[in-house]
Image: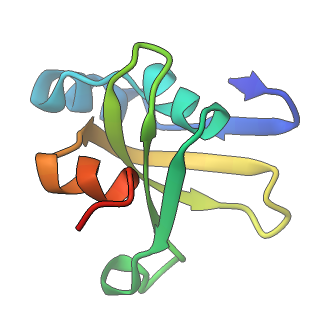
Amino acid sequence: MRVGKVNFEWNEGKNDLNKKKHGVDFREAATIFLNSPIRIFFDPDHSEDEERYVAIGISINSRTLVVVHCESLEGITVRIISARKATKQEQRLLHGGV
């Protein structure tokens, strides 16, 4: 899936499992990267084979989501690994609360 200058990719089998487990489709998850606010954090605990990031943002469906992803070195491709609804604490983090 391409949005603007960024390509989004994912494993369809993982997307199916994610939809069943968390109720979030990766197509919706990709839309958080188009909206503000968005917070992105490096995830050192899960970055052994590749650098992983955790993004918190608002989807096109107005849901606050947490999206685990990797980025290409050029920043042109984002590979979505998992996505779920944000907890209340994560929602506060997105909006500047503690």
Q: Is residue 30 left or right of residue 43?
A: right
41 lies above or below 92: below
Instruction: State how many labels appear.
Output: 0
Of residue 73 and residue 94, the one placed in the foreground of this image is 94
Residue beneath the point at 33% across and 24% down: 63
Q: Quadrant of the N terminus?
A: top right
What is the image's colouring?
rainbow
Q: Residue at x 42, y 86 (%)?
A: 48
* Residue occupying the point 45% across, 42% down: 57
Q: Is residue 79 above or below residue 46?
A: above
Residue 54 lies left or right of residue 35; in this view the side is left
- Compared to residue 54, the image places residue 8 above or below, namely above
- In the image shown, does 92 or 47 lie closer to the viewer? 92
Tell me residue 50's x, y (percent).
Answer: 53, 76
Is the C terminus in the top left, top right, bottom left or bottom right quadrant?
bottom left
Residue 75: % across, % down: 79, 59
Q: Quadrant of residue 68?
A: bottom left
The picture places residue 66, in percent across and down from the top left corner, at 33, 46
Residue drawn 14% across the image and 46% down it: 87
Residue situated furthest top in the rendering: 61
Report the front residue among 95 and 26: 95
Left or right of 31, for residue 97: left
Q: Is residue 68 above or below residue 35?
A: below
